[in-house]
Image (spheres, helix red, strand yellow):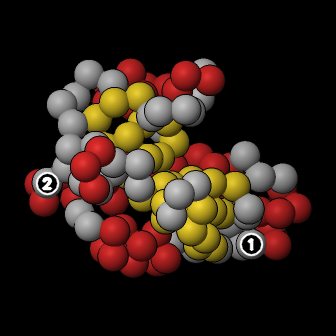
Amino acid sequence: MNYQRFNQFCASLPATTYVQQWGGSHVWKVGGKVFAIGGWGKDQTPAFTFKTSILNFGFLSEVEGYKPAPYFASRGMKWIQLYDGDAAKDQDLHYYLSESHRLVSLGLTKIKQKQLDLNQNPNDS
């Protein structure tokens, strides 16, 4: 995946915003909270960082091409970086980016979730 496709996918998720920060990285947020970062790869190679569940963090930490995310994981956060991706990993990356979006959005206040129309159970109305 390249950064253009990464940005297109992240933009397709609900209630997202985009900024460039941290050395020109592509930073995606939901409700003002970061859920995905495109950048920080070595030698200009694309790299993608995202939040994971505890189970996925353990699993992906052992998979070739993935590693605990610099800066985040060293602070105890469950973030992974895909640093060696290929077209075969694009579908997996879509899943992990969607999950990161969901996990981060669940950490927002209920009021903020409602304002952004996120995680709303239709039976709650």
At label 2, which amino acid type do we have? Asp
**Compared with residue 61, is residue 6 higher up or lower down, i.e. above or below?**
below
Q: Which mark is residue 86?
A: 2
Q: Position of residue 112 (x, y in %)?
A: 83, 63
The residue at the point 28 percent across, 35 percent down is 66
Q: Which residue sits furthest right?
A: 111
Q: Which mark is residue 116?
A: 1
> Which is more toward the observer, 41 or 95?
41
**Compared with residue 36, is residue 57 higher up or lower down, i.e. above or below?**
above
Q: In front: mark 2 or mark 1?
A: 2
The residue at the point 26 percent across, 22 percent down is 62
> Which is more toward the observer, 119 or 124?
119
| Corner quadrant of residue 33 | bottom right
Left or right of 18 in this view: 54:
left
Q: How many marks are shown on the rendered structure?
A: 2
Q: Is residue 98 visible?
A: no
Q: Position of residue 79 (x, y in %)?
A: 50, 36
| Corner quadrant of residue 76 | top right
